[in-house]
Image (cartoon, rainbow, N blue to C red):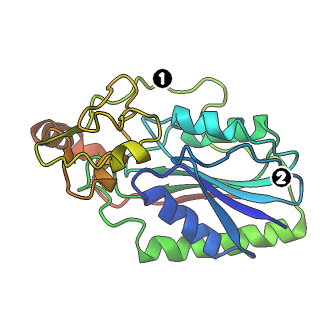
Amino acid sequence: MANYNIYFSPTYGTEKVAMALADGLHGDFKAINLCDEKDDFSLRLNQNNLCIISVPSYGGRVPAIAVEHIKKIKANGAKAILVCVYGNRVWDDTLSELQDVAESVGFVVAGGVAAVAEHSIFRQFATGRPDGDDCDQLACFAKQLQQKLDAGNFDKIVLPGSHGEYKVYNGSSFKPTANEECVGCAICADNCPVGAITHENPDETDVQKCISCMRCICVCPVGARQLDKNAVDAVAQKMAPAFEGRKKNYLFI
C-alpha cells in the first residue's frame, strides 16, 4: 500500500507535526510538499492508499493555495488522516474545512489532529513546538490510528468547526520585505508558494499575491527578508492574552 505525507509547511512547523505522526504509522510515506510548485499534485489514488494531509491554520482557515493543490487529487476512496497546525491560539474552521475539501475529492477520513507549532510570525508563542512531549503524544495517537486502519473501521467522523460556512479570513497585513543585505540570490523566489517574488526583482514583494506565510524569511540565507519589528511587537503585545500559555493538541478518531 502506497502512503503519502502531504503537507503545506512554509516554516517547517507543520512538516514536523506531519513527520512525527507518520513515524508512528506502518510503512514508508512519500513526502509531498504543497509549497513546492514544481511538484505534481495530481495524484490518482485508490482505497488501498493512505495519506496524511497537513496544513497550518491561517486566520482559522486552510490556506487557499493548499486547497487549490489538494483539489487536484483524485482520491477514489483512499484513507486520510487530517492535520491542522495552529500557532497557540485556536484553529477555528481549519480542520472542518480540510475535511470538507478532502471528502470532496474522494478521501475517507480516518482521523484528525489539531496540533500546536511555533507561531510563524510571533515566534515567542509556542516556541520550539512541536517538542518532545508533542511528538510522543502524536506517536501514541498514530498507534491508535493504525489499529483503526488495520480493523477497517471507517465509520463517518465529523471533525469540529463549521462545515460549509467558514470563518471569513481577509489575509494578514504582515508582508515581508527585503533590506539592504539582499544579495539577489532569488532563493526566496524559488520557494515562494504563490509566486509573490520574482527572479528579476527578488528584493520586492507583490503584496497582493503574498499570503504572509513567512517562507521567504525562513529560507533567506543572509537574513535579508524581514517584517516591521515595531508593528509585530505591537500586535504581539495586544494579542498576548490569546496566545500565551501551553495550548494542547486535540486528537480525533
Determine whether the residue tagged by mark 2 lies in a helix, strand or loop. loop
Residue 202: percent from the left, percent from the top? Answer: 29, 38
Q: Report the Cα–Cα distance between label 1 and label 2.
A: 30 Å
Q: Amino acid type of disc 1?
A: Val
- Residue 176 found in image quarter: top left
Residue occupying the point 86% across, 55% down: 154
Which image quadrant: the N terminus? Answer: bottom right
Tell me if residue 34 comes above or below residue 200 in the rendering: below
Q: Amino acid type of disc 2?
A: Ala
Residue 43: percent from the left, percent from the top? Answer: 76, 47
* Disc number placed over residue 78 in the picture, else none: 2
Q: For the residue carrying disc 1, how many other residues have a C-alpha within 10 Å: few (<14), some (14-19), or many (20+)?
A: few
* Disc number placed over residue 16 in the picture, else none: none
Labels 1 & 2 near each other (Cβ < 8 A): no
Q: With 21 as the anchor, is 119 left or right in this view?
A: left
Tell me if residue 206 comes above or below residue 183 in the rendering: above
Residue 19: percent from the left, percent from the top? Answer: 56, 68
Residue occupying the point 37% across, 42% down: 189
Which image quadrant: the C terminus? Answer: bottom right
Determine whether the residue tagged by mark 1 lies in a helix, strand or loop. loop
Tell me if residue 57 comes above or below residue 137 in the rendering: above
Report the residue marked by disc 1.
168
Residues 180 and 63: in front is 180
Residue 217: percent from the left, percent from the top? Answer: 28, 49
Badge nearest the viewer, 1 or 2 = 2
Residues 249 and 195: in front is 195
Q: With 163 as the anchor, is 149 left or right in this view?
A: right
